[in-house]
Amino acid sequence: MTELLIILCLPLAGAALLGLRGERSWAGEANAAISLVTFLGTLALAARVVGQGPLVLLTQLFFVDAFNVFLVTLTAFVGFTTSLFSRVYMRVEQERGRLTGKRLRLYHGMYQMFMFTMFVALLTNNVGILWVAMEAATLATVLLVSLYRTPASVEAAWKYFILCGVGIAQALFGTILLYLAAERVLGAGGSALLWTHLFEVKDQLEPTVLGIAFVFLLVGYGTKVGLVPLHNWLPDAHAEGPTPISAVLSGLLLNVALYAVVRNKVLVDAALGTHLPGYLMMGFGLLSVLVAALFLFRQKDVKRMFAYSSIEHMGIATFAFGMGGPVAAFGGLLHMTAHSLTKSAIFFAVGHAAQKTGTQNMDEIRGLVHVSPAVGWGLMVGGIAILGMPPFGVFASEFVILTTAMRDHPWAAPILLLGLGIAFASVFTRLQAMVFGETTAKRLPHPPAMLPVFVHLVLVLILGLYIPPYLAAWYRQAAAMIG
Amino acid sequence: MNGPLVGQVINLLAALMLLIAFAMLAQRRLLRLIHLFALQGAVLTLNTLVVAATLAQSHLYFSVVLNLVLKVIVLPMILIRLVDRLDLRADAESVGNLPLIMLVAVVLVILSFNVALPISELAGTITRGTLGIAMASVLIAFLMMITRRKAVAQVIGFLAMENGLFFAATSATYGMPMVVELGIALDVLVGTFIFGIFFFQIRETFDSLDTRNLESLKDRE
């Protein structure tokens, strides 16, 4: 209960404080401190839930089980490390005159607001509030994408706003239909949208209505996951916004949207008694992997390239949850964790690299190891990890997902392998040139914030080599719930 | 009120809703578009009021008030102020091939009725017959967003879409639970403010509110 209040109230209070005073010199530190305490709060909550089992709190408004507490902890952790990176990164941006005090206030205030909306989305027990919080997460980040006010960033933010707004309106329609079906079983009123109640009667819900509802929910939340063909906003928003925002959008928001899809899928699966939702998710997932891999090859902008790589990896995770069953769900959860940690680490390194060379164009970024060994090696190791090379965590999760696919759906495995292969070929050559190429650039004056990068990469390495037993037990609990 | 009469009134309001959706699709003048949007909000509010009075559902009165304040008064006022400050009062745009757009809209209506049929048979509400119209208004608003080039008109389309969704919630289930409805209203309000900020950002950056300027981000070769 106390933990929950810390997790929810602290970011909200932080948003208010930093919204008013976010241009002060201590704002970056305050942002990091708030994120740290929030993270400690999520650790305490996670310990409680793993020990005592699922909790229903605050007159059933909030619900914590192994599945969402794992994502809450991950969100708070990446939120904290990103705030460390953002402290250094935004200071340099400010010194270069790209940001005024007013924009820094907006940035810091909205950073905490964004964390708050994600925690609400993850922790709420009400499927309607889940929708409200997802929409609020878009609203919190949309002005951050246009923070630099360049023509490209304003365009990216507008696209993000309109496409996600329209997309998520479909999810609202899906939620209305879900409520229609639930009301017939549970009676009218607030309790008919509570997930814990819905879960108990999930096999009595009207299948026709839920089938149609799921299509709307998948298209709606799928837009935010970045599933092809609803992905158009994602590369622009990632490339044009400030890099810390790219890191949290890619590492966290996409996960939360996928969480919303999976939560609803559990209900629809039981009501339908068929595998239709699973096949839909597998289809969207495979299409995303393949299309994103082909687009990866054509990119010139380094942040855009890694944005397409995020689409690819969310496709893999969606495919895994679509297959269903505890093993595939385990792989999906592991993949979400590994991708989240690796991709944010890559964005940290890319952020420093782009800040140093003054460009995001990959043809102009060369010889990072000579300019700054830490950034160069960070990017290289991160790149190898995200491409699914052993011994990193992404390899482990992709291995689990691929072997499950070969056993249950052999037709899908070649498509997945093809996508992964193309992605490897296109990203690796680019990386090599950026990191080891010839350069005339001088060493940089600013010491980069490389601690978050290496902490993330070490964690991903550990996930690949050895999953600690308590973590494995936790994943298994969560996977059993959604599998 | 007795049953058949209420049914007639609700059907009449639903028909008005659809008519306004078509009118918005064809309206070139921005100011008129905002008036139509306010009118749609008023029809929506009236519809909710009729349902609330018939069923004596107290939470529906709450959403009547919420609708009246937000969609008939606050949002149109914000939009008109924005139009004034951006100096767009006399603004009109060409809508393209209007007969074709209307024809597409008619097809969308037929489609919506077909999709809504199995669902509305399951709904136990007196308003269930109007679910098809609600779905049609959502799709027509979507069509309006696609066919418009000016940012303000696109946003009005977006808000009209939300009206359609609200209408769907009333016809299928007598409205969502109160806390959800409050949350949605808050999102819509904040969203409209942010859209307002965007109009200024877009105009500052491109000297125009034409969204054709916003099509340069592609995958550059």
Image (spheres, coloured by chain):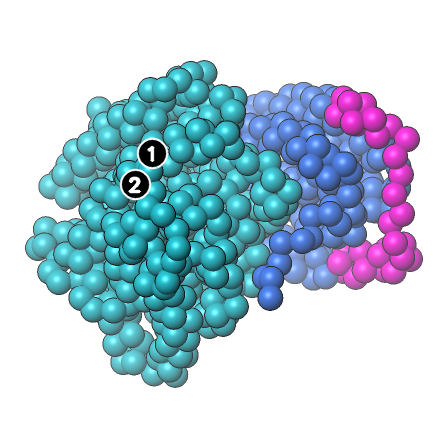
Asked if the stretch drawn in magenta spans residue A326, the answer is no
- Asked where in the image residue B171 lies, by quadrant, the reply is top right
Q: Give, as a three-letter code, the residue at label 1.
A: Val
Check the residue under mark 1 and report the chain it is in: A
Q: Give, as a three-letter code, the residue at label 2.
A: Pro
Q: Secondary structure at mark 1?
A: helix
Residue A88 circle label: 1
Q: Nearer the viewer, residue B104 or A175?
A: B104
Give left or right: position of B214 versus A38. Answer: right
Residue A348 circle label: none
Q: Nearer the viewer, residue A74 or B174?
A: A74
The stretch in magenta equals B81-110
Instruction: Give the residue at mark 2.
Output: A448
Above or below A433: residue A237: above
Neighbour class for label 1 at 10 Å: few (<14), some, many (≥20)?
some
Which chain did the renderer colour blue? B
Majority secondary structure in the magenta region: helix
Answer yes or no: are tags 1 and 2 on the same subunit: yes
- Residue at figure coordinates x 60%, y 55% from the top left: B119
Check the residue under mark 2 and report the chain it is in: A
Q: Nearer the viewer, residue A239 or A61?
A: A239
Palette colour of chain A: cyan
Above or below A219: residue B65: above
Q: CA distance from mark 1 to mark 2?
A: 7 Å
Above or below A265: residue A273: below
**Residue B121 drawn at (x, y percent):** 62, 55
- Residue at figure coordinates x 36%, y 69% from the top left: A428
- Residue at figure coordinates x 79%, y 52% from the top left: B147
Q: Earlier in the sequence, mark 1 or mark 2?
A: 1
